Image (spheres, rainbow, N blue to C red):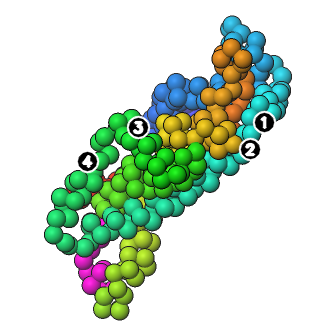
Amino acid sequence: MNAKALPAPFALTQRRSYRPLVRIVLVYGLLIILSVPFVFPFWWMVTSSFKSFNEIFAYPPTLLPNSFALTNYEQVFELQPFTRQYWNSIYIATLVTIGTLFFGSLSGYAFARIRFRGSSLIFLLLLSTIMMPSEVTIVPLFSYIQDLGYGNSHVPLVILPMFAGPGITAAFMTRQYFLGLPDELEDAALLDGLNRWGIFWRIAVPLARPVLVAVGILTFLASWNLFLEPLVLITDPELFTLPLALRGYTDPYGQPLWGEQLAATTMSVIPVLAFYVLAQRYVVESFAFSGMKG
């Protein structure tokens, strides 16, 4: 039986059943096309890290290397103490993230749930500090760190972000979330004998998991990519973080060693990419919650 012989209602129903499938194909096809400008540079970076210098700049460019060689990756570890520098970035970003989550959520809860005189003004002044570019304060910051005797060390790279831009951002995002908690929840906890710390640690923090994950991702990424402060405060290559290490892959004339730089960059994005892929659902949820109350 052909389509013309089908009853009219059945043929109409059959055409309607294809519409969702066609819509899905069109939407995904459009998304794939739009993703090319974002995916292609990453693809080129990863594949070119296995290419020779001549193949990297060959015309027309190749999507895949003619042969996957690990020479560039071997050179990355021979030219610099890359393993140590990689570890430096990992442990600094981890400590900054943990400290920022703790102090940021603690201050966010205080501003949201504890009423005290001048809280709104203090919070406004706190937010105003992140409007000042770090380049403006880097010189007095350098002088202050040197006077304290912490120059050429990781101490300022760990402590300062907890109470600077990432910490203030964490306080703002968690405050927005804690404003949405019902008062009845705290009243019930007080009746059960919990104090302020118990309410914060046992009730508020578990409920704020989506926003805390998002803050953790943003903080980890900011610390991982931090460049200006390590550039000014650190001079020992053994103490370099990855952003400083990447700029060191040059020849004696100061020209980039493209293969080594691409290999090092490829390895440097792996932790951030994995961290974000595993927790991206919480990022979307947290930004939705952060705009619920002001």
Cα gap from disc 1 to disc 2, whole angstroms: 7 Å
The crowding category of the residue bearing disc 3, from other C-alpha atoms within 10 Å (few below 14, some 14 to 19, many at least 20), is few
For label 4, the SS is helix
Residue hosting label 4: 128
Badge 3 amino acid: Val
- SS majority, magenta: helix
Q: On residue 139, which mark appears?
A: 3
What secondary structure is marked by label 1?
A: helix
Do tag 3 and tag 1 residues touch (Cβ < 8 Å)? Answer: no
Q: Which mark is residue 77?
A: 1
Q: Position of residue 161 (x, y in %)?
A: 45, 51
Label 2, residues with CA under 10 Å away: few <14, some 14-19, many ≥20: few
Give the quadrant of residue 175: bottom left
Query: What residue is pinned by disc 2?
Result: 83
Callout 1–callout 4 Cβ contact below 8 Å: no
Q: Amino acid at mark 2?
A: Thr
Horizontal side of 15 relative to 83 (left or right) equals: left
